[in-house]
């Protein structure tokens, strides 16, 4: 079983997860989410400072862990989509340069031609 880049999973249309990841990424970069995280961290600090029961301490820690893991998955998805978009743009620029210099087939031309889609080989 191979795992595909999020951009290659659903073909030209984005999957529901990709759409959800984009919405969640937009939400997590908002001031509202920042406020939620501040409240969560405040709750965590307050439970420790007030010497509350172990159950509340565990609840606060588990909430922070869950939020962290979800953000990690969303961040990785957004990173891979952005990386793929940048690589496609660079390949288009390299292709345009190759077409512009078809007559000049020096070492730089060959290096540029070999560099296109190099990320797929590594």
Image: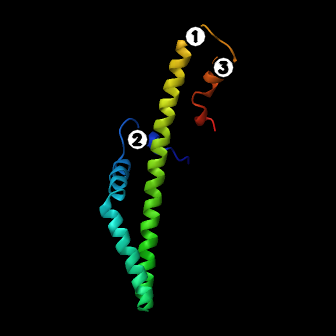
Q: Nearer the viewer, residue 122 or 41?
A: 41
Q: Nearer the viewer, residue 97 or 16?
A: 97
Left or right: 1, with 11 as reference point: right
Secondary-structure class at tag 3: helix
Colour logic: rainbow
Residue 41 drawn at (x, y percent): 41, 75
Label ID, residue 10 = 2
Residue 91 drawn at (x, y percent): 52, 28
Label ID, residue 102 = 1
Mark 3 neighbour class, 10 Å CA radius: few under 14, some 14 to 19, many 20 or more: few
Left or right: 101, with 63 as reference point: right
Mark 2 neighbour class, 10 Å CA radius: few under 14, some 14 to 19, many 20 or more: some
Label ID, residue 47 = none
Mark 1 neighbour class, 10 Å CA radius: few under 14, some 14 to 19, many 20 or more: few
Of label 3 and label 1, which has the lower sequence position?
1
Q: Residue at coordinates 43% horizontally, 55% vertically from top-left?
A: 74
Label ID, residue 108 = 3
Vertical placement of 8 versus 30: above or below?
above
Residue lying farthest to the top in this orientation: 103
- For marks 3 and 2, give the CA distance: 36 Å
User: How many callouts does the rendering have?
Assistant: 3
Q: Residue at coordinates 55% horizontally, 46% vertically from top-left?
A: 2
Residue 30 drawn at (x, y percent): 32, 57
- For marks 2 and 1, give the CA distance: 35 Å
């Amino acid at each position: 079983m191979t795992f595909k880049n999020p951009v290659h999973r659903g073909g030209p249309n984005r999957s529901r997860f990709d759409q959800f990841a984009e919405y969640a990424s937009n939400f997590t970069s908002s001031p509202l989410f920042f406020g939620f995280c501040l409240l969560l961290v405040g709750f965590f600090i307050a439970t420790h400072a007030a010497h509350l029961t172990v159950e509340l301490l565990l609840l606060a820690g588990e909430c922070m862990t869950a939020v962290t893991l979800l953000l990690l998955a969303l961040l990785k998805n957004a990173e891979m989509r952005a990386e793929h978009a940048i690589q496609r743009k660079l390949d288009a620029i390299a292709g345009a340069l190759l077409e512009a210099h078809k007559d000049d087939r020096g070492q730089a031309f060959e290096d540029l031609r070999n560099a296109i889609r190099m990320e797929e080989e590594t």
